Image (spheres, helix red, strand yellow):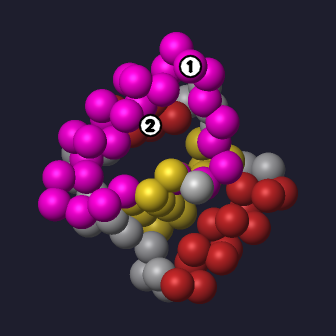
Amino acid sequence: MRILTHGDCDGVCSAAVVKMVYPDAEVYFTNPSRLLRDLKKMETADGLIICDIALNEGEWSLVFEEVKRLSSGFEALYV
């Protein structure tokens, strides 16, 4: 399981809550302008939760396509 979250206070707290449920999850800090690039760098994942990342309408479809690519075989969560 991978958690991508914003590095601000509510992003860190969101990731901490998710880690309580998935203690073996890896946490990666990102931000709205880096999310797409960070997703493209990932080759595989066995689970994906994105926390506290607000996107503009122009990037949403590109991010959605990357999430679909990574999440073949599981449901990704965007919180």
At 73% from the left and 62% from the top, the residue drawn is 12
At 65% from the left and 76% from the top, the residue drawn is 17
Q: Residue furthest right?
A: 9
Which amino acid type corresponds to the residue marked 2 in the rendered image? Asp
Q: Secondary structure at mark 2?
A: helix
The local crowd at label 1, few if under 14, some if 14 to 19, many if 20 or more residues have their Cα within 10 Å, is few
Q: Quadrant of the N terminus?
A: bottom left
- Is any atom of residue 28 visible in this view? no
Mark 2 and mark 1: span between their CA atoms? Answer: 18 Å
Q: Are marks 2 and 1 in contact (CB under 8 Å)?
A: no
- Is any atom of residue 66 visible in this view? yes
Residue 68 in percent (x, y) is at: 26, 42
Residue 38 got which mark? 2
Would you say residue 48 sits in the magenta stretch?
no
Which amino acid type corresponds to the residue marked 1 in the rendered image? Glu
Residue 44 in percent (x, y) is at: 22, 52
Q: Which residues are magenta?
A: 50-76
Residue 36: quarter of image: top left
Residue 61 in percent (x, y) is at: 40, 24
Residue 57 got which mark? 1
Residue 18 got which mark? none
Q: Quadrant of the C terminus?
A: bottom right
At 66% from the left and 36% from the top, the residue drawn is 54
Would you say residue 54 sits in the magenta stretch?
yes
Q: Secondary structure at mark 1?
A: helix
Please, is residue 1 above or below residue 76 in the view?
Answer: below
